Image (cartoon, grey):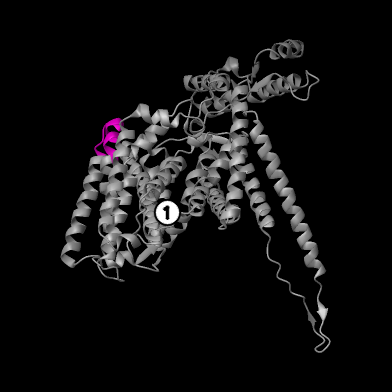
């Protein structure tokens, strides 16, 4: 009767503020004193059921405005055993209930980026609504294509051969049209993006915070290393940093980085410093790979540039639209994109110096080294002139790409942290290709890279250098000081690893197919982890199966890897269609892409004004 009479007043109050009805906590009946024995959990459950039913039926609306604070009851069920008298809960349970209540109130305003609870789902932006319409139309369009194709296939009925009397099918191999491939790719991508949104924006799944322990990081590392060693094959070629080897290198580094992120190992400084070397190694490969291509092939055409930019940025652009995140949020892609453009401009500017031209005259080698020297000076200038760097990237429309939280400081910090390693990769590629051209290296199967004495000496130096860096990184006490030294010294461990991996002929002749498979989708793995493996924008861990951490990590990891692999295939398919080799068609596509980004900038500006 009392709850029935107070319910309309609570409903009225709930229209202007948040009202919570706290469910009664259970008791531990065995510890209750004699004068409290009449308090039973059966009666408490009856009280709670009465309160819930009356408050939920007190309004004509489908849902009551009065919210049930039932979490305190769940906490009490776990902690009532620690009660001194069986009735009053321990202090820890009240602190947890208070913390959750404050989360409910504060998180809607503060909007923390970790895996905290109780944040309302952000409203859909205009760009997100347009993206949803586009993907829906793509799915409908592909289904129509599929139905038409299936009906046409059914009409292809078997006919009877008059001579043999056997039935034969009129086999017509109709090629898949580019439009159908386009619709199929966007159809699959639309379904994948819906999963992304549900995981990290729709509040359908729980997120939990990370908690670092040494075992949570090192045990998975040992496990994947054993798997990687077990699956090994012979390489197709035995050159230094051949394709299989670089895929393997990317693969095991990416797996280590994933474990680092999900275990929250960034709080342990020695691990953090070694992971910084892995990120630097990715950028080293960027410098090495792109320099080698331009130097050997001499292909500075627009098609090559567009292919690379599309493959690097397609997924991130889609995620920026669907997940409503700035481009700089996925910091690694802007980093490799800018460095690719720096490499391209450095080598494409007059005079264009390539290997074919340099072979006829050694002065061209000097000219290339001069270009690299100017590049190094340019890097040093930007690294030590924060003001100039920020002015360049604060210009519109660059600011729309590189600003995070209203400024470009995060971008400057990320760029500066590995400022020399791409240059080191380019220089290493130049020296290696020059030595290879002069046949200084022995790259035959099973042969050491140099003579035995030189190979043993370089191996010894490499192992000592590798261990010295690890000892230094493990003794780091201050992250800021170590980050300041990192750009200059990270190349030591990278070069040491390359020499250890490539000097022995037997090591150069085999690779891990397990790691190489992951290496082929390493970029997709790095980007997808933000929302469908870690969730809460990498600050939390996605929980698909509550209450069973091991099963949850197995299921979420399986889906995560499958999605990354599928996105890699979609990106490759779309790259062939959207970036054609024909220059006239390519220019038309580029005009369409430019118009698309202009429209995106206009819509983004409108959204920003409406938010303000």
What residue range appears in magenta? 474-487
Whether 30 is drawn above or below 321: the answer is above
537 and 305: which is toward the camera: 305
> Most prominent secondary structure in the magenta stretch?
helix
Mark 1 falls on what kind of element? Answer: helix
232 and 208: which is toward the camera: 232
Residue 460 seen in this snapshot: yes
Image coords of residue 76 (percent x, y): 55, 25
Q: Quadrant of residue 108?
A: top right
553 and 585: which is toward the camera: 585
Whether 238 is drawn above or below 401: the answer is below
Left or right: 245 in relation to 549: left
- Count of marks, rendered view: 1
Instruction: Look at the image and say whether residue 555 sits in the magenta stretch.
Output: no
Give the quarter of the figure containing the N terminus: top right
Which residue is at a point 77% across and 75% down the rendered structure image? 170
Left or right: 156 in relation to 311: right
Left or right: 38 in relation to 75: right
Image coords of residue 378 (percent x, y): 32, 38
Image coords of residue 172 (percent x, y): 73, 72
Query: Mark 1 sits on what residue?
Result: 251
Residue 548 seen in this snapshot: no
Instruction: Look at the image and say whether residue 483 sits in the magenta stretch.
Output: yes
The residue carrying pointer 1 sits among few (fewer than 14), some (14 to 19) or many (20 or more) residues within 10 Å by Cα, namely many
Which residue is at a point 60% across and 22% down the rendered structure image? 609
Q: Quadrant of residue 40?
A: top right
Q: Quadrant of residue 69?
A: top right
Furthest-bottom residue in this view: 163
Whether 510 is drawn above or below 555: the answer is below
Give the quarter of the figure containing the C terminus: top right
Image coords of residue 504 (percent x, y): 26, 64
């Amino acid at each position: 009767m009392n709850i029935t009479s107070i319910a309309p007043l609570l409903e009225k109050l709930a229209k202007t503020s948040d009202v919570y009805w706290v469910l009664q906590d259970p008791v531990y009946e065995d510890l209750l004193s004699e004068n409290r024995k009449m308090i039973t959990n059966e009666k408490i459950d009856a009280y709670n059921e009465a309160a819930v039913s009356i408050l939920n039926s007190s309004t004509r609306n489908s849902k009551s405005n009065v919210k049930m604070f039932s979490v305190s009851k769940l906490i009490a069920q776990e902690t009532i055993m620690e009660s001194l008298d069986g009735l009053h809960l321990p202090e820890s349970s009240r602190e947890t209930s208070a913390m959750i209540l404050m989360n409910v109130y504060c998180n809607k305003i503060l909007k923390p980026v970790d895996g905290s609870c109780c944040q309302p789902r952000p409203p859909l932006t205009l760009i997100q609504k347009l993206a949803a319409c586009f993907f829906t139309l793509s799915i409908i369009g592909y289904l129509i294509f599929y139905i038409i194709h299936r009906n046409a296939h059914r009409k292809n009925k078997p006919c009877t051969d008059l001579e043999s009397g056997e039935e034969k099918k009129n086999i017509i191999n109709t090629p898949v049209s580019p439009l159908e491939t386009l619709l199929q790719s966007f159809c699959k991508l639309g379904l994948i993006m819906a999963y992304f949104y549900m995981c990290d924006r729709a509040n359908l799944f729980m997120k939990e915070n990370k908690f670092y322990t040494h075992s949570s990081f090192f045990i998975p590392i040992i496990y994947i290393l054993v798997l990687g060693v077990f699956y090994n094959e012979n390489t197709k070629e035995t050159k230094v940093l051949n394709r299989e080897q670089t895929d393997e290198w990317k693969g095991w580094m990416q797996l280590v980085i994933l474990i680092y992120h999900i275990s929250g190992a960034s709080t342990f400084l020695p691990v953090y410093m070694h992971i910084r070397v892995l990120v630097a190694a990715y950028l080293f490969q960027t410098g090495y790979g792109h320099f080698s291509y331009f130097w050997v092939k001499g292909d500075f055409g627009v098609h090559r540039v567009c292919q690379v930019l599309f493959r690097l940025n397609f997924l991130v652009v889609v995620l920026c639209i669907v997940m409503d995140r700035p481009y700089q949020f996925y910091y690694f892609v802007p980093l490799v994109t800018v460095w690719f453009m720096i490499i391209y401009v450095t080598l494409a500017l007059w005079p264009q110096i390539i290997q074919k031209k340099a072979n006829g005259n050694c002065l061209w080698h000097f000219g290339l080294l001069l270009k690299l020297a100017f590049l190094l000076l340019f890097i040093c200038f930007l690294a030590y002139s924060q003001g100039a760097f920020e002015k360049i990237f604060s210009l519109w429309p660059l600011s729309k790409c590189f600003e995070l939280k209203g400024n470009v400081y995060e971008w400057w910090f990320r760029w500066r942290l590995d400022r020399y390693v791409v240059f080191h990769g380019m220089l290493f590629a130049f020296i290696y290709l020059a030595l290879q051209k002069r046949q200084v290296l022995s790259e035959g199967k099973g042969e050491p890279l140099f003579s035995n004495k030189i190979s043993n000496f370089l191996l010894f130096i490499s192992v000592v250098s590798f261990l010295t860096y690890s000892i230094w990184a493990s003794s780091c006490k201050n992250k800021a000081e170590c980050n300041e030294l990192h750009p200059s010294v990270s190349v030591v461990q990278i070069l040491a690893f390359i020499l250890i991996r490539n000097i022995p002929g037997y090591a150069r002749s085999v690779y891990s197919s397990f790691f190489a498979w992951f290496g082929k989708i390493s970029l997709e793995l790095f980007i997808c982890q933000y929302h469908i493996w870690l969730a809460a924008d990498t600050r939390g861990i996605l929980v698909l199966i509550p209450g069973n951490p091991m099963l949850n990590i197995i299921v979420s990891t399986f889906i995560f890897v499958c999605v990354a692999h599928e996105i890699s295939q979609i990106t490759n398919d779309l790259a062939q269609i959207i970036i054609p080799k024909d220059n006239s068609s390519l220019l038309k596509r580029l005009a369409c892409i430019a118009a698309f980004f202009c429209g995106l900038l206009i819509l983004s500006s409108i959204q920003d004004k409406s938010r303000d």
